[in-house]
Amino acid sequence: MTILDKTKPVLVTGATGYIAGWLVKKLLEEGYTVHAAIRNPSKKEKIAHLEQIAKKEKGEIKFFQSDLMKNGSYAKAMEGCEVVFHTASPFKLEVKDPQKDLVDPAVMGTKNVLEQANKTESVKRVVVTSSCAAIYCDCTDLENTKEGVFTENDWNTTASLRYQPYSYSKTLAEKEAWKMSQQQSRWELVVVNPSMVLGPALNIHETTSESISLFKQMGDGTLKAGVPNLGMGVVDVRDLAEVHFNAGFNPEAGGRNIASGHNSSMLEMAQILHEVYADEYKIPNKPMPKWLLMLVGPMVNKTLTKQYIRNNVNKVWKADNGKSVRVLGAKYRPLKDTLVDSFRQMIDEKLV
């Protein structure tokens, strides 16, 4: 059991990211000194919101220039830290070169950060943000689970560079983290596996998360003909920040941890938003027929291949989040709150 010193600084990689931003906010609220590692600290529009939060909170923030693809670039940022949160990893579904755009940054970035942890004597715990994408590839994988529910024991075995390369990148990166963790004994590894992360962004105009584009499509009429009935899990980004915090500082934390508040679907989410915003926006409340999706899906979005549609549309997604509740103190807010807060922000910022 590792007891950690709260006076020591804490490293967050990719600190300006969607998930990382809320984690940084939580750390500052709790009075920690945050070493925020980002690619370009001189871009004021990227860091202004974190500086503003730091002014109001007990903690302190220091920015460090670091690059996932550059060996040794996390050395200064990690100095003196006992806890390292590695959240930096690209979340893009449509890419030109999956190896270069997804797999290399995810795997080499993880390797880079953990190699630095091996060299930094102060490090006692590393928290890696993985994904439920490393647990399953398609909703049909549910049929092969022991209890008919995804758990921390499950691994994605079917994603590849050609099929669901984002999921493939997350799987390879997490496996690399476990391999490196087992090759040493000074620091311990805790992995957080979130499902689809939704909720308001702290810096929405600089956020590139796929979840933002999902809300855009629901509100701007792109999906007015119907929404794909895709089974998926959902977790609120604010709840996820709390889970990460406890993964870092709860002495009992360990292993993999599914962080997912709701077993849901795109259709259910659209119907909830339709109920609230139908008078103002063309939010769909009906499913797009599978045959029609098969016809137009691949033309509209390269990731909507016939194989993907076959394996995920009109299929149930179900995961056991019990460990995150028991060990990491997860409290998951109602799905409607997450969706309404997200969409309201999109409206306020004139993004729909």
Image (cartoon, rainbow, N blue to C red):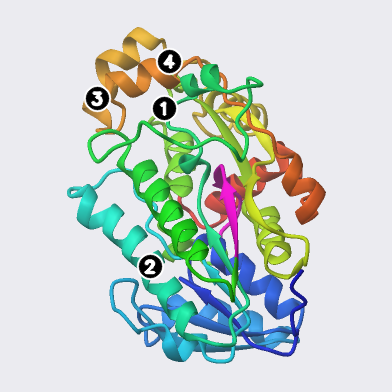
Name the residue that disc number 3 marks.
Answer: 298
Find out whether residue 140 is within the magenta segment.
no
Q: What element carries label 4?
A: loop
Judge depth for marks 2 and 1 and give the one in front.
Answer: 2
28 or 293, which is in the foreground? Answer: 28
Specify the segment rendered in magenta. Answer: 189-201
Q: Is residue 142 visible?
A: yes
Q: In the image, what residue occupies the spot 63% across and 87% down?
A: 9
Q: Is residue 301 above or below residue 225?
A: below
Q: Tell me if 13 is positioned left or right of 109 in this view.
A: right
Judge depth for marks 2 and 3 and give the one in front.
Answer: 2
Judge depth for marks 3 and 1 and give the one in front.
Answer: 3
Going from the N terminus, do you reach mark 3 or mark 4 first? Answer: 4
Give, as a three-letter code, the residue at label 2.
Lys
Using the rendered view, name the quadrant where residue 223 is placed: top left
Name the residue that disc number 2 marks.
Answer: 111
Q: Distance between the residues labelled 2 and 1?
A: 39 Å
Give, as a three-letter code, the residue at label 1.
Leu
Is the residue marked by circle 2 packed among few (<14), some (14-19), or many (20+) residues within 10 Å?
Answer: many
Is the residue marked by circle 3 packed among few (<14), some (14-19), or many (20+) residues within 10 Å?
Answer: some
Going from the N terminus, do you reach mark 2 or mark 1 first? Answer: 2
Q: How far apart are marks 3 and 1 (CA)?
A: 15 Å
Q: Is residue 352 visible?
A: no
Going from the N terminus, do you reach mark 4 or mark 2 first? Answer: 2
Q: In this view, does 97 lie above or below 155?
A: below
Give, as a three-letter code, the residue at label 3.
Pro
- Residue 50 place in picture, x, y as percent: 57, 79
101 or 58, which is in the foreground? Answer: 101
Label annotation for residue 288 = 4
Using the rendered view, name the quadrant where residue 154 is placed: top right
Judge depth for marks 4 and 1 and give the one in front.
Answer: 4
